[in-house]
Amino acid sequence: MKARTPIVAIVGRANVGKSSMFNAILEKREAIVAREAGTTRDSLMAKAKYNDQEFWLVDTAGVKNPEDDFEFTIQEQIYQAAESADVIWLMVEANVSVNDDDRKLANLALKSKKPVFLVINKIDQVKKLSEADQHTKFGIKDYIFTSVNQKKGIDELLNKLSQIIPTIKYVEEDPNTIRVALIGRPNVGKSYLFNTLAKKQQAIVSDRAGTTRDINRTTVKYHQSDIQIMDTAGIRRAGKVEKGIEHFSVIRSISAIEQSDICLLVMDVNELNVQLDQKLAGIIKEAGKGLVLVVSKWDKAEEKDPFLRDTLAAQIARNFEFVPWAPLIFTSSVTGQNVTKIFEIALEIMEKRAKKLPTRDLNKWLEKMIHKHVPSGLKNRYPKLNYITQEMDNPIPAFKVFGSNTKFLHWSYRRYLEKGLREEFGYEGTPVQLWFIEKHVGHKHGNSPTKAPRKN
């Protein structure tokens, strides 16, 4: 069974404190917090860690009556949480009487058969906890009284979560099947590409954005390898509201990313949305998955400008410079251009992700890199790198570099080593992890993947 990072969804009516809880846990202002009900119109997500356990935290929009398509979109996200999240936090207000929306959400959460925590927030606004007891009658066994404003109950909530995470069960997966997820905004051509790859109409294709309402799956065989293709509902741009069933299916998309080995980030050549596409690429990288940048609908664009490919390739390289290892491919589901090549790239990436390097070769490479460029330090402390080994049980190419004063190693040197590792051994299409460990300090597998610190 492949390791996954669990998804925790915060659901509840508007203005119960979901965004404030989201921010308090992440200790940074990732979500919009305002007095006006329903301000948080888009789900926001981030990877969090508590007690050495990582999880995706998703802040969903509040529930209102589906008076129009937009409110339907908000309510649909709650169903996604029940469908795709691993843990559900249902938030209610301690100082507000129970209403029908709370009851409906509680019933939906319980029907999901997922672990559910009832978070009774704003206890600072009641005189006695007994005034909030009405909420405990939903039938949800685990409940926590919190006050995000006063930082009360948050540690208790996270402690309960850390106890639940190891007990989460996932469906057994065939280790010999390669899983490829199509990720991207609505209407960029994911479903057409899905159909072309599958060579049969298993996805619903429509001119309206967001018509793929679930994770569609099909398995094909290519060069004796089984490849499962997953098509997700698209993620729309924040603030863009259109009629129809378009919705921000972030929970479903994160779930597909976590289930996959490789993600195809599909982008419409006629509407490249740099900021959101960059965010998606960052999520895929952080999840440790293989990544291919796929430009769709290329047949029409190439007819208009035969020199467009070189221009766009340079532009995309600049926009995605944080994933320079991700291959770029231009495709057309109409003509079939380069569609088969996607399978070839997927097989190549999986081969590289599974590559195991002899320790002797790794240490020869490390010695060469140090000889070429000796690491400098900070605060008059100089790092010394002694040897390197590969973690054999990690699905991501991961390497441990042992030495002394490694915490003073400059971020640019870490980048230098990663680049050199890729050039020497070839890791195109996949992230790699480098962990720098003090020789006499114990290391727990997977605790601290190296990330280049930001400049001050």
Image (cartoon, rainbow, N blue to C red):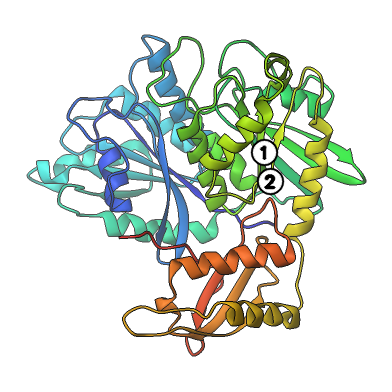
Mark seen at residue 181: 1
Q: Is residue 404 left or right of residue 94?
A: right
Nearest the viewer among 123 and 212 is 212
Q: Residue furthest right?
A: 224
Q: Residue at x 67, y 38 (%)?
A: 181
Mark 2: few/some/many CA within 10 Å (<14, 14-19, 20+) = many
Q: Amino acid at mark 1?
A: Ala
Q: Quadrant of residue 202?
A: top right
Residue 282, percent from left and from top: 51, 46
Q: Of helix, strand and loop, which one carries label 2?
A: strand
Write the residue at 19% across / 25% down.
Answer: 36
Tell me where residue 287 appears, x and y as whole percent.
Answer: 56, 51
Q: Which residue is mark 2?
A: 262
Q: Which mark is residue 415?
A: none
Q: Residue at x 20, y 32 (%)?
A: 34
x, y percent for residue 20: 25, 42
Up-down relation of residue 71 to residue 416 (above or below): above
CB atoms at circles 2 and 1 under 8 Å apart? yes
Q: Amino acid at mark 2?
A: Ile
Left or right side of 15 for 454? right
Q: Say which label, 2 or 1, has the lower sequence index.
A: 1
